[in-house]
Amino acid sequence: MNDDRGHAAPVALEARDLTKVYGAGDTAVRALDGVSLAVERGQSIAIMGPSGSGKSTLLHLLGALDTPTSGEISLGGERYDGLGESQLTALRRDRIGFVFQFFNLLPSLTAEENVLLPALIAGRRDSEVRERARALLERVGLGPRVHHLPGELSGGEQQRVSIARALLMEPEIVLADEPTGNLDTRATDEVLELLRELNAHEGQTLVIVSHDPTAAATAARVVFLRDGRVAGEIPGGSTERVIRALSDR
């Protein structure tokens, strides 16, 4: 991806030779085996692969939810693979947004309160962050439902709340783990269109892990994993192309 002057965009997220081994000795499982990946600022990529390919492990490492056995990970040029837990907590809270398959909303909190959670954890209760939460809920089409509890919202609406929450702290990158995996067809289309708009029109850097070719095709790049290694990549934009690529692997 190039900027307006034709220059290559800065790298937002980079992994170099990542490995992740669970267990030891004869029972050791190598979930990742030398994965390298770079995501430019403002780019969207999808990560695909069969069950056990390592895609969820990779997302957990990129999101600082787990630590690699070896290798390097950096965000905005700053390495975080060796940081302590308190530093990783701050990194996840302030610089990375997360969208999960099962929404991870607190059922006793309203949509607005769920969106505000990252700020409240950071000790922010100012009017500016509350106004941003309201604006984000408007942006995702939920302005009239800010006071609704998750149980009063459809699955697609709950996922849009989680997207608004992921954007609250203005993260450098958003990681989406099977964001449409728990949605019906209509809600899937709505959420994918929202993610596409956030990337195309607002420049949000986005990494999607998905088994769904339609979801993966919304990204500019589709990276395939197999047996813990990168097995190739193709340009996104076409569901049919993604399906063909999957059948070839």
Image: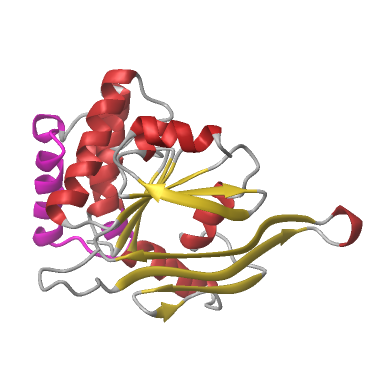
Query: Image quadrant of residue 170?
Result: bottom left
Q: Based on the displayed image, in which of its 4 quarters is residue 110 positioned? A: top left
Image quadrant occupied by the N terminus: bottom left
Q: How many marks?
A: 0
Q: Residue at x 91, y 56 (%)?
A: 26
| Residue 130 is one of the magenta-drawn residues | yes
> Magenta segment, principal secondary structure?
helix
> Which part of the image, by quadrant, shows the C terminus?
top right
Taking the image as shown, residue 153 lies to the left or right of residue 31, namely left
Q: In this orientation, which residue lies closer to the viewer: 190 or 124?
A: 190
Residue at 38 percent across and 39 percent down: it is 216
Q: In the shown orientation, is residue 131 left or right of residue 71?
A: left
Question: Is residue 55 visible to us here?
Answer: yes
The residue under the point 52% across, 77% down is 83
The magenta segment: 118-145
> Is residue 105 among the parts visible in the rendering?
no
On the image, the x and y values in percent for residue 60 come to 52, 55
Q: Residue 125 appears at what percent x and percent y? A: 19, 60
Residue at the (42%, 36%) spot, across then down:
242
User: How far across and down, in percent of the image, does residue 165 sit?
Assistant: 27, 48
Q: Is residue 240 above or below residue 64?
A: above
**x then y, percent, for residue 75:** 38, 72
Is 217 contained in the magenta span? no
The colour style of the image is secondary structure
